[in-house]
Amino acid sequence: MLVSFSSALFTLIPLQAAAVNSSSDALSRVIQGITAGVSFLGAGEILRESAQAPQRPEVRGLTSAAAIWVSAALGITAGCGLWQLGLIAAGLCFLVLRVLKRFEHRN
C-alpha cells in the first residue's frame, strides 16, 4: 500500500507544480533523482545477508523501505509548497502504518 501511495504522490507533485509554474522540466529531473536515490536506500533496507547462511540474502524490512519512500515523497511535496497535499498524504500514511497494522499477521 505504501509503495502505491508513494507512486501516486510522486505522480501528483509534478502535476500540481505544473499548474503553478509553467516550467516543470527541472523539477521533474530533481524528482527523478530523488526517487532513484531513495530506491537504493530502500533496497539496502530490504535485502540483507542472512545470519544463518552468509551467502543467502534475506528479504525483510518492506514496510520500513516503503516508509522511507513515503517520507521522501512528503519531503518533495513540502519542498514544492504543496502543504495541503502533504498534510493529506501524511494523514493517509499514518492511517496505513498505525491503524492497518492491526490486520497484519505475524508468523
Image (tube, rainbow, N blue to C red):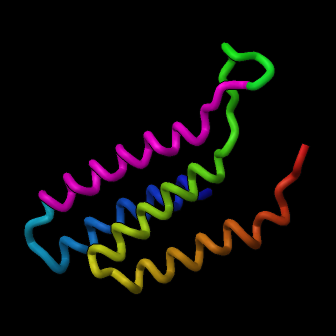
> Looking at this rendering, what residue extends furthest in the left direction?
23
> Looking at this rendering, what residue extends furthest in the bottom direction?
84
Question: Residue 103: image x %, image y %?
Answer: 84, 61
Q: Is residue 92 left or right of residue 8?
A: right
Question: Residue 89: image x %, image y %?
Answer: 50, 74
Q: Residue at x 19, y 61 (%)?
A: 27
The C terminus appears in which quarter of the rendering? top right
Q: Is residue 51 left or right of residue 76?
A: right
Say how many tags the image has.
0
Residue 13 within the magenta-colored segment of the rendering: no
Q: Is residue 19 above or below residue 58?
A: below
Residue 47 within the magenta-colored segment of the rendering: yes
> Looking at this rendering, what residue extends furthest in the top direction?
55
Q: Is residue 83 left or right of residue 66?
A: left
Q: Is residue 67 left or right of residue 33?
A: right
Q: Residue at x 37, y 84 (%)?
A: 83
When asked about the image quadrant of residue 21, the answer is bottom left
Q: Is residue 101 above or below residue 86?
A: above
Q: Is residue 1 above or below residue 43?
A: below
Question: Residue 16: image x %, image y %?
Answer: 27, 74
Question: Residue 98: image x %, image y %?
Answer: 73, 71
**Residue extent of the magenta highlight:** 26-50
The N terminus appears in which quarter of the rendering? bottom right
Q: Main secondary structure of the magenta part?
A: helix
Q: Residue at x 52, y 44 (%)?
A: 42
Q: Name the foreground residue: 4 vs 78.
A: 78
Q: Residue at x 50, y 61 (%)?
A: 70
Q: Is residue 32 above or below residue 60?
A: below
